[in-house]
Image: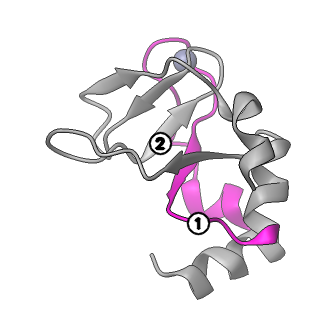
Amino acid sequence: MNDEMLDYLLATDSMDEFLGDKSRCPHCGNKLINIVYGMPTWKVGEKAKKGEIFLGGCTIYEGEMPKYHCNNCRRSYTKDLKRYIEEENNFEDEEEEY
Ligand SMILES: [Zn+2]
């Protein structure tokens, strides 16, 4: 997904449709949010503050990059939801950077 696509989805609030009902946390059943990497746009930053997306920043993971995040468990899942990474911090501690 490129930036224009992401901005479109965020601007039109169609992210829910895009994700569908499949994106649920396998651990707690909470709705998963998309992880956005790199420098976020203003719009993306606002969404992140509201907990609608998760900022992955410039973190480099070994192996596959996580695609979804559960705010409840603070876990970041790979696309197939088979593997996850425990996040030490949520975006709250980093929002001053943006
Ligand atoms: Zn969860």
Q: Nearer the viewer, residue 27 or 1?
A: 1
Residue 19 place in picture, x, y as percent? 56, 55
User: In this orientation, which residue lies closer to the viewer: 2 or 82?
Assistant: 2
Marks 1 & 2, CB-CB < 8 Å contact: no
Dividing the image into 4 quarters, which one contains the N terminus?
A: bottom left
Residue carrying label 2:
68
Q: Residue at x 56, y 14 (%)?
A: 73
The front one of 59 and 67 is 59
In terms of image quadrants, where is residue 14? bottom right
Q: In the displayed structure, does residue 76 sit left or right of residue 84?
A: right
**Hey, what amino acid is under mark 1?**
Met
Q: Residue at x 47, y 42 (%)?
A: 68
Residue 55 drawn at (x, y percent): 59, 48
Magenta stretch bounds:
13-42
Give the residue type that dot 2 points to.
Answer: Tyr
Q: Is residue 17 magenta?
A: yes
Q: Main secondary structure of the magenta part?
A: loop
- Residue 92 coordinates in the image, percent (x, y): 76, 30
Q: Ligand 1: does it lie within 8 Å of the C-beta at label 1?
A: no
Relative side of 38 to 72, left or right: left
At label 2, counting other C-alpha atoms closer than 10 Å, the crowd grade (few under 14, some 14-19, many 20 or more) is: many
Q: How is the image coloured?
A: one colour
Q: Is residue 68 left or right of residue 10?
A: left
Tag 1 residue:
39
Residue 48 counted in the magenta span: no
**Residue lying at the far left of the rendered structure:** 63
